[in-house]
Amino acid sequence: MRQALGYERLNLFGSSYGTRVVLEHLRRFSDHARSAMLWGVVPPDFQRPLWYPRDGQAAFDRLVADCAYDAACRRAFPAIVDDLRELLARLDTKPVPFQLTDPRTQREVATSITSAGVAQAIWSALAEPDRARQLPWVIHAAARGDFAPLRALDVAVRPPRRRYYNGMHLSVVCGEEVLHSTPAQIAAASGGSYMNAERGLEYREACVRWQVPRARLRRPRPPWCRACRRSSSLARWTRSRRRAGGATPRRRW
């Protein structure tokens, strides 16, 4: 495409998965890149859903620390970790039934709030500052039986989830990432995190049903380049781990 357009060097921009495309372009054609901006980096060695529990826990730990640092948050929510632990244990025993509006059909669908669903909601909310800052109140209220703030987050149907085309998404991530983890590895990786293995195993089962072959991948270290890397809210899950050189964060669970 670069040759067809007649450009000698490109200014590259990538967001989320697009950062991986930019990094691959730099690996193959670095001489034809003038600059690169990576927003919400998905590094070449990222492997979903294997790292979701670990990185989700690291992001949650940072949220707890931020709340403890803020006097008003600390006074209002002094036991966020205990609240979440008690909430998840109670939902493991007895999920809470409720009605969800299907965004495509606008029909009411009977479902239930489960511990895995709450964990997924927290994980999704941590990616966006305007939702992440609501989590202490959301968790505190839910632990006391009030799920209205949790439902108001609307993480199941609000953007960015609505913009996904699941078939296209699975066609890419299944072969490149998901199928490179075994069920046993996914289960083991959830230890010490508020996220159990249920959603990760569901993710992998969807890939098996989608019948996407596992890709043979090279995951080299990206080459040095003059790039402007912006760690946006989308990279919140991985920042702590990257700074620690890949070390597993301290667990609370």
Image (cartoon, grey):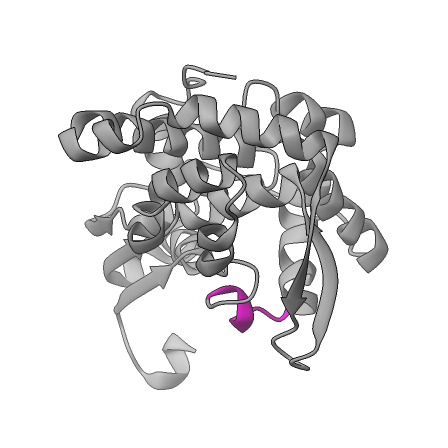
Where does the image place residue 51, in percent across and percent down from the top left? 54, 33
State which region is magenta. Answer: 160-165
Considering the image in quadrants, where does the N terminus appear? bottom left
Residue 222 seen in this snapshot: no
* Image point (30%, 64%), residue name: 13
Looking at the image, residue 202 sits to the left or right of residue 157; the answer is: right
* Image point (29%, 55%), residue name: 130
Asked if residue 162 is among those painted magenta in the image, a careful observer would answer yes
* Image point (48%, 51%), residue name: 150
Residue situated furthest left in the rendering:
71
- Residue 97 or residue 221, whichever sits in front: 97
- Residue 54 or residue 222, whichever sits in front: 54
Q: Quadrant of residue 103?
A: bottom right
Q: How many marks do you count on the picture? A: 0
Where does the image place residue 126, in percent across and percent down from the top left? 39, 44
Where does the image place residue 181, in percent across and percent down from the top left? 70, 34
- Residue 193 or residue 1, whichever sits in front: 193
- Residue 81 or residue 5, whichever sits in front: 81
Above or below for 201 versus 29: above
Above or below for 182 versus 124: above
Looking at the image, residue 147 sits to the left or right of residue 117; the answer is: left
Where does the image place residue 131, in percent across and percent down from the top left? 35, 52
Asked if residue 57 is among those painted magenta in the image, a careful observer would answer no
Q: Quadrant of residue 34?
A: bottom left
Above or below for 71 versus 36: above
* Image point (64%, 80%), residue name: 104
